[in-house]
Image (cartoon, rainbow, N blue to C red):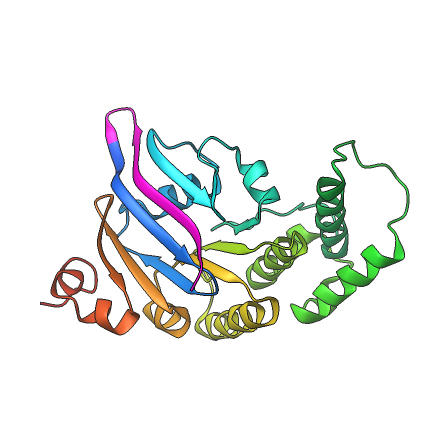
Amino acid sequence: MTRIMEARAMHKSYGQVKVLEDVSFDLEEGEAHVVIGPNGAGKTTLFRCLSGETRINSGSIMLNGQDVTGLAGWQRVQRGIGRSFQVARIFQDMSAFENLIVAIETRERSEKGLWASFGHIAPRRAVMDEAERLVHELGLEGTLDDPAGTLSHGDKKRLELAMSLALRPKVLMLDEPTAGMSPSDRSEAVRLISDVRARYGLTLLLTEHDMEVVFGLATRLTVLHHGAIIASGEPHKVRADARVREVYLGQH
């Protein structure tokens, strides 16, 4: 497999609080790599550092062979990183369809190097067609004209995923994608994420608490504890690791 992301010796502190200590992390093209760990282990901080939302204190991050350590989040998006959040980041007062139009037109402006503000010109037919395709693929047909802020929790997560896909990422980072969902919604989310990964040929990086979701999606599993990686590898092997069972899975 081709290594698409490589981070080495990452350290991240907030004041005197060390959150990541000497973390080295690889992401292989095409895999579904899930990061787990107890609350406070550093999972979200790891995501923030890899996506460029926050800067590491020391270490390096490579993406597709290029050093992106000093690049801002929006610059990493341009280089192929898409991201969702524990709380969906959508335009609450706009319709679901308008959210998708904005995401697609943002990508097109980025590709063309145009960062001017959006005007009031109707979107091109190709943009409308792409938005409609994403609506159908993500199962959002019944929500098109509703203000995004009024959607159910599950539909907000679907919309955010569709907006991420509109940016055509190579790496899709999902932070707790099933948080707050009912058991039936979680099962549907696992199916949807698996389908999206296969359809778009994506590399996935996820954090997740629900073990059924983890083992339903992961091709590789990494465990963080107190800001350090204590195990990484094939899910069944990591699951059997004595230290992992002790510090996270609650078994001795």
Q: Is residue 201 placed above or below 40 in the rendered structure?
A: below
Image coordinates for residue 49, horizontal then vertical, percent: 41, 39
Image quadrant in which the N terminus is located: bottom left
Instruction: Identify the residue shown where x is 72% and y is 43%.
Output: 111
Question: What segment is highlighted magenta in the picture?
Answer: 1-17
Q: Could you say which is closer to the camera, residue 180 or residue 43?
A: 43
Q: Is residue 39 magenta-colored? A: no
Magenta highlight: main SS: strand
Q: Could you say which is closer to the camera, residue 3 or residue 233?
A: 3
Image coordinates for residue 99, horizontal then vertical, percent: 72, 50
Q: Is residue 177 visible?
A: no
Side of 122 where 190 appears, left or right = left
Image coordinates for residue 167, horizontal then vertical, percent: 65, 51
Q: Is residue 11 magenta-colored? A: yes
Q: Is residue 28 placed above or below 76 in the rendered structure?
A: below
Q: Residue furthest top?
A: 15
Q: Could you say which is closer to the camera, residue 19 or residue 229?
A: 229
Side of 251 where 147 appears, left or right = right
Q: Give the image quarter of residue 143.
A: bottom right
Image coordinates for residue 189, horizontal then vertical, percent: 51, 69
Side of 178 where 228 appears, left or right = left
